[in-house]
Image: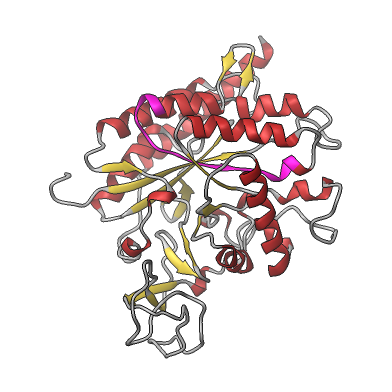
Amino acid sequence: MAATRPPLHLLLTVDVETWPASSGPPGRDFPADFRRCVLGTTPGGTHGLACQLEILARHRLKGSFFVEPLFAGAVAGGSAWLAQTIALIRTAGQEIQLHPHTEWLAFHPTPLVPPRPRSDRMFCFDGAEQERIVRRGLELLSAGGAGPITAFRAGSFGADDATLQALARCGIPFDTSFDPACTGTECRIGASRALKKPSMAFSTSGTASKAYGSLTESTDWKSVDSGGASLPRYQPIYQRAARPPARHPVWLDGVWEFPVGRFCDRGAHERHLQLTACSFAELAAMIRQAHRRGWTHLVLLSHSFELLNRTRTRVDPVVMDRFVRLCRFLETNRDWVITVGFEDVDPATLGSDAGVPALRSHRGRTLWRQGEQALRWLFEDWSHRS
């Protein structure tokens, strides 16, 4: 397989975030919330972030950990908890990226943005406010010891076009907030404005005012005019696509958008590639199929608490087995599928897979996963009663 096709680059992304277990002001019992959501502490052992990092290290795999930092400004001692999270990830040699949940802003003692009736998604704020949120997140991560940030995912995928423009102004080149399963509800990124690459060129000015294809407006892209000198890093010139690619990396509003991976599991119904949402058979089959069909990059989603049951009180044996088997599969097949981070992505290599086919599973795998998920819920119900 490796001899005939280039390798697939798999981005194993983990959102690291903390949520209160009960209603009321966040931070009332934050240490317990942190142990539950991030550390994964249970009576039977610790099955959260450190466990995930250890399994990845055991199989020599790379992950991208999207850390939620805004809680640090909302709870007493939050900066120390954030620094502990960052230290765990950096010590394991994995990369840290930005994942703000704007729900925490309402509890900051000094408002970062004006209050409003709804503030639980990035799209609730205008472009200037979103830029302030992004910059505040970067400041908190930097203060906690994180290195350079190259990628972003909005909390609950709640990004819009203004989010991407804010990221471009903040110098973050990659976004992975676009989840087609949430389009139009949680995710409001305008996929109809996706751009497709027809050619490459260079510019010293960082603008492209000459018309290329259907692009006639000036842009702030570091692209090229027809006779410019090259820059050390460059971006391609794009044209608007009649049917925008929504599965592969696309250039939108000054950043590269990496959609969360998805596949058709029955008919036209689509399911995203998330550890708790797919069986191991589905994950392995879709990774193989992506490579066979010429995909260059594929994004898989997970969270710091996904190895636990829904109440975060016990390990979920089905998902734990699923994760271990996936890591073993990736280690065994590293000749044709490579786990990478966003810091490894070269923008010059992107855009070549826009026309490759979608991923499709079959009814047999779907039925197996439904049975497997049913067993998870039955085990959890039994655990609560025992």
| Residue drawn at the location 59% of the way across and 69% of the way down | 165
Q: Residue furthest top?
A: 386
The residues colored magenta run: 57-72
The x, y position of residue 87, in whole percent, is: 57, 32
Q: Nearer the viewer, residue 217 or 47?
A: 217
| Residue drawn at the location 31% of the way across and 54% of the way down | 296
Q: Is residue 126 above or below residue 267?
A: below
Q: How is the image coloured?
A: secondary structure
Q: Quadrant of the C terminus?
A: top right
| Residue drawn at the location 67% of the way across and 16% of the way down | 384
The x, y position of residue 230, in whole percent, is: 34, 75
Q: Check if residue 186 falls in the magenta segment.
A: no
Q: Quadrant of the N terminus?
A: top left
Q: Is residue 309 above or below residue 202?
A: above
| Residue drawn at the location 59% of the way across and 30% of the way down | 305
Q: Nearer the viewer, residue 277 or 190?
A: 190
Can I make out residue 91 in this image? Answer: yes
Apparent side of residue 105 relative to residue 299 in the rendered image (left or right) = right
Q: Is residue 236 above or below residue 29?
A: below
The x, y position of residue 152, in whole percent, is: 55, 53
Count the marks: how many? 0
Can I make out residue 241 in this image? Answer: no
Apparent side of residue 22 relative to residue 315 in the rendered image (left or right) = right
Q: Check if residue 65 falls in the magenta segment.
A: yes
Apparent side of residue 125 relative to residue 179 in the rendered image (left or right) = right
Q: Is residue 293 above or below residue 251?
A: above
The x, y position of residue 324, in whole percent, is: 40, 25
